[in-house]
Image: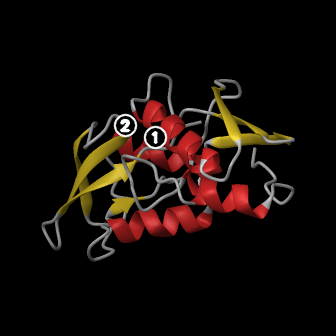
Amino acid sequence: MVVELNNIDKDILDALASVPDPEIPVINVIDLGVVRQVKKVNKQVFIDLTPTYTGCPAMDMMSVDIKKAIDALGYETFVKLVIKPAWSTDWISEEGRRKMEEYGIAPPLEENLDKRVLLDGESLVSCTHCQSTNTKMISQFGSTACKALFKCHDCLEPFDYFKCLK
């Protein structure tokens, strides 16, 4: 469920694109797909934000940063957390996935492949350092709950894998 952002004023869209995910600072809230709706009424902007998972600690910081960025344009900003529909890793843009991988976090696989990796231990996740799939999950949880920790058997480097969430 991708949100159409073409109807948003360019200054507001640019401000939103300047707000990074606090846990993955190379990805902004637009590329992460957490901005669900933006409405402008005169000098007020209403933004619906969907957490990547319920209780995600980054959402408070994102809300504050979004409000600061939009308020700086002279608007009064209202950010509301919306939990339905639940966020999905499908909402991460292609640009966001590319940035994530360049940053050292393997982007999520398709749901059926993700289950084979996380539950069956299949070597399907590409190492972000050398692109080998000779990788193994070390822990179901990486630097945050939405990531798993992997190690590459070719270059021996550890890296995070962003779990598929649907």
Give the answer, above or below, for where 70 lies relative to 82. Answer: below
Q: What's the coloring here?
A: secondary structure
Residue with the mark numbered 1: 115
Could you tell me residue 13's position as x and y percent?
70, 58
Badge 2 marks a residue whose secondary structure is helix
Could you tell me residue 134's position as x and y percent?
26, 66
Instruction: Specify whether 114 is left or right of 145.
Output: right
Residue at x 38% of width, y 71% of height: 102
Q: Residue 119 carries which label?
A: 2
Residue reaching furthest to the bottom: 130
Alpha carbons under labels 2 and 1: distance apart: 5 Å
The amino acid sitting under disc 2 is: Leu
Residue at x 28% of width, y 37% of height: 140
Q: Nearer the viewer, residue 54 or 89?
A: 54
Task: Choose top left, top right, bottom left or bottom right for residue 6.
Answer: bottom right
Q: Residue 100 carries which label?
A: none
Could you tell me residue 86's position as x and y percent?
64, 29
Give the answer, above or below, for where 6 lies relative to 75. Answer: below
Contact between labelled residues 1 and 2, with CB atoms less than 8 Å apart: yes
- For the C terminus, the quadrant is top right
The amino acid sitting under disc 1 is: Lys
Q: Which of 146 and 44 is in front in this view?
A: 44
Could you tell me residue 129's position as x and y percent?
26, 73
- What is the count of numbered marks? 2
Q: Which of 123 and 47 is in front in this view?
A: 47
Residue at x 68% of width, y 48% of height: 74
User: Badge 2, how many Cα within 10 Å: few under 14, some, many 20+?
Assistant: few
Badge 1 marks a residue whose secondary structure is helix
- For the N terminus, the quadrant is top right
Task: Choose top left, top right, bottom left or bottom right for residue 159.
Answer: bottom left
Task: Choose top left, top right, bottom left or bottom right for residue 7.
Answer: bottom right
